[in-house]
Amino acid sequence: MVPIFLRLQALQKSNITFWQTLPQNFSDHVASIDAKVLAVFVSSSFLGFNLSRDNVRNLWMTANYSLNSGDYISTLIWVSSKTISEDLTSLGLVPFPDNYPEDVKTFLDSGRKIPAKNQAIRDIAAKYKQPQNMTQTVRNVLDFVSEQEYDPEKTRLLMSGNLNTTDILDFFKDALEVRETNSSICIERSWYAAAILRAAGVPTRTVTDVRLKTWIQVWLPEYGWVDAEALCVQPPPMFPRPLSSSTPWMIENSSDAAFPFTWLPDALMRVANLTFGDVELFDVNQYKMVLSEPVDAELFRKDPTKFSFPIVFKPEMVYAAITQEESHLTFSLLKENENASKMLTLGESNSITFGDLVFSFKPIRQENFLILQDFAVGEVLKFDVRIFAPVVGVSIIVATVWLYWIRRKHGR
């Protein structure tokens, strides 16, 4: 189970649309990854909400916000993933084809951060292109970009919570800036490699995983999309790249560069958190909506820990799961050896009591997701004799004084 915790703070008053991708099932030449979005907690100040899917299987969540300076946008995504297969068989000679499929041609074009038609980029591509051999061309370009210096300070700034920007993509260098400075981080180097490879006639796109690691994919006839490492932090192979440890967050879905989250129009924001290291930052009652891909009930019964997500951290950890069996949806809560569950009724208010807590929400369906609206967690109201005792004591005293006063009055 992998968390993706995103927290942005508005530094000016603005109305924006916030976009974020949700990890989905993924396959390429090397492996297949079955990624299940267990839960997405969305902060409660949004005005409107929608889900949509693009042409490369990214699922996009969009929410409209009206923000004052200092306001936060927060999402917490819990993902469960499994590598289905992996094959690192070496690739042989692959000649350049005469034509490319229509859905692949777009990945030969220039984009905002990938200037494939720039003459300086074309000159580099001509130097490293191996005529009639796409695989060797890819290896040549990867060897070239690997000579770049790594820029650890930029990574630290991105992850530090101190990055202020009006546009998250503007924080990163484009391919020409990478060429000029000779330093980069993984996403910048991936765009640089993509620009050169596109200029050489190799369709290329990028993939970013849940830990913000970015690499490239190249399209080869008979193989399809094959992963390659533009910034190798582990020993080779760089091509094809092992995929088993990576859960994709976003696949670049056009000839342009993209990022797993963004906002429009430009507004000054602080990227306050991109990791989930401190549970003190998470208060479930700041999130009035939860999304979930229901898990097959039989699959959940076989391995509950893999398909349940933390929903309350203090004073004790409470986990939740949403499962489906035929047309029936069930909301389950788990804590050590305790559990409780409730079959859900769509479109109506549902509640479930678990120990000292009561969970309430209104479930609806959209796409393959279940959306829990008006989500709230509260404490069960209980009779407490410690509270009642002082009240009784005061009442007895008042009654005693009153009776004493009545007797004295009538005694006169």
Image: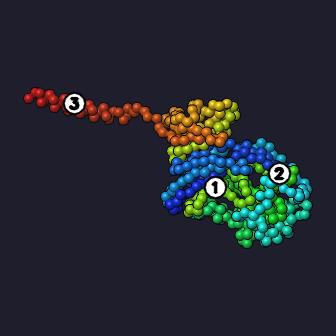
Q: Which residue is mark 1?
A: 261
Q: Which residue is mark 3?
A: 400
- Distance Cα–Cα, label 3 vs label 1: 68 Å
- Looking at the rendering, which quadrant does residue 397 occupy? top left
Determine the residue positioned at 74% across, 47% down.
26
Which of label 3 and label 2 is nearer to you?
2
Q: Is residue 131 above or below residue 50?
A: below
Q: Where the C terminus falls, by quadrant?
A: top left
**Residue displayed at 50% across by 60% down:** 13
Does residue 276 appear anywhere in the picture?
no
Within-10-Å neighbours for mark 1: few <14, some 14–19, many 20+: some
Query: In the rendered image, which residue does mark 2 sit on?
Result: 224
Given this view, does label 3 or label 1 mark the residue nearer the observer?
Answer: 1
Pick the residue in front: 284 or 166.
166
Residue 347 appears anywhere in the view: yes
x then y, percent, for residue 330? 61, 33
